Image: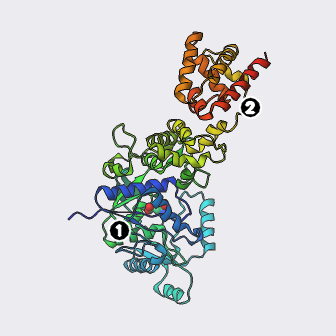
Amino acid sequence: MEREVRTRYEPSPTGYMHIGNLRTALYEYLIARKYGGKFILRIEDTDQERYVEGAVDVIYKTLKMAGITHDEGPDIGGEYGPYIQSERKHIYIEYAKKLVEMGEAYYCFCTKERLAKLKEEQEAAGSDSQKYDRHCLGLSKEEIKRNLENDVPYVIRQKMPDTGTTSFEDAVYGTITVENSQLDDQILIKSDGLPTYNFANVIDDHLMKITHVVRGNEYLSSTPKYNLLYKAFGWEIPTYIHVPLILKASGQKLSKRAGDPSFEDLVSMGYLVEAIINYVVLLGWSPGDNREIFSLKELESIFDINGINKAPAIFDMNKLNWFNGEYISKLSEDEFHEIAKPYYEGAIKNGSIDLKKVSRLLQPRTEVLTSIPANVDFFDSLPEYDRELYVHKKMKTTKEIALNSLNEALPVLEQITEWNEQNIHDSLFKLIEKLAIKNSQMLWPIRTAITGKAVSPGGAIEIADILGKDETLSRIKIGIEKLKNNG
Ligand code: GLU
């Protein structure tokens, strides 16, 4: 019988969700959904030195924010709990002791000082291997018993084979083979009684019946050691899916510690969750055609392990901006207005500005919400600007043409009794026809005069409508003065 597909996300409680974690969680989740299986959340908190207060709650919060729902986990329970590794201490000890009995692991009582000295000597001798020298493998049964009775601190190490090779199939990287003689007798149980990741992942993946393991390719070289543990216990090895590194454009590893944004940072920077998810799923996976826009729901059926690449993925903010713009443009007017509103506060204090109209202008032109304040502040007050702004080659406009257009437009606009887009449009186009000038020679100067900016969301007519008649006329007069005064 086919095993039920079970995947797991195993974050360490660091206090944030790294982009790499989000991708791993997504892939695990998508594999489970695609095959109608289960997605399990397990907390890897066996490193007490890295303990961060409140960090487990951050894990629940960020998963919820991303819309990635787990079927089993510490907060919702399940058949295979507990799902927090520090609560499973007794289980790991029990299995480690079994390995000792089988001769696959051994107690090691070496002090920190001895290990440090060993390392120093190995370095001094120019040895490229930093393996443990198996000092404690030769201890007699009596010595071990005496040490344990005397509470001498110990770790339990895995005993690696001296000869031969270990191979495994990775779904992404293919066949990986290592010489067993290269493998270090890694620690399984630390002196504080807690397991290392290297041990806990194997025990838990087996006991929780995990079928597919997705994780960063930094674990690729340790996986043969894990497989030797599976073999020792006679357990079935899961499907391994190691995923490539995520790099910055500079070639460095994307890292929260180096100041790169986490998932929740991106959300507070004004990125839409759907856009982030869509972008992140493509960091190392492609659907095999040119489609780029996918909802999480669609991905649940489309995602395919065969589409995962081994080449490092590049995290490109510009590309993320593009995705965000795509998702923003798909929102309804009301939805966009709701998410844009907080960004108007502080930038537009003038209560007579119709913010809904501003939203209509902005929506097709916005990639990142945080760019909004700087794009709309001119509605509140005309910024200082240089009259050279009126000069625009493509618009066929010079300062002289601009001055003439503004002078002509002023009385025409003054005559409009009902100030709306249609009437402003009709008046200006009648005037353009009468003057026999290009549209741009009228619209560019007005746009410049009423925004004071080289770039603005929308053109002269839409912006004049929002500003209102008085403000538009007063800004045009300022423009005329500016153009007149300095020759
Ligand atoms: N806590 C590990 C990490 O975040 C888990 C690796 C795994 O998924 O097995 O890298």
Q: Quadrant of residue 70?
A: bottom left
Badge nearest the viewer, 2 or 1 = 2
Q: Do the residues under discs 2 and 1 have CB atoms within 8 angstroms?
A: no
Is residue 215 visible in this depiction of the protein? no
Report the quarter where the C terminus lies. Answer: top right
State the residue in front, 269 or 425.
425
Q: Does residue 139 sit above or below 461 in this rendering?
A: below
Residue 394 falls left or right of residue 183: right
State the residue in front, 42 or 423.
423
Identify the disc placed on residue 384: 2
- Number of callouts in the render? 2
Q: Which residue lies furthest to the front in this view?
A: 417
Query: Mark 1 vs ligand 1: CB under 8 Å?
Result: no
User: Badge 2: how crowded within 10 Å, few (<14), some, or many (20+)?
Assistant: few
User: Residue 108 appears at what percent x and percent y?
Assistant: 52, 77
User: Badge 1: how crowded within 10 Å, few (<14), some, or many (20+)?
Assistant: some
| Dot placed on the residue nearer the N-terminal end, 2 or 1 | 1
Report the quarter where the N terminus lies. Answer: bottom left
Q: Does residue 225 sit above or below 155 in this rendering?
A: above
Q: What residue is rendered at 66% in x and 39% in y?
A: 377
According to the picture, the residue beneath numbered tag 1 turns out to be 230
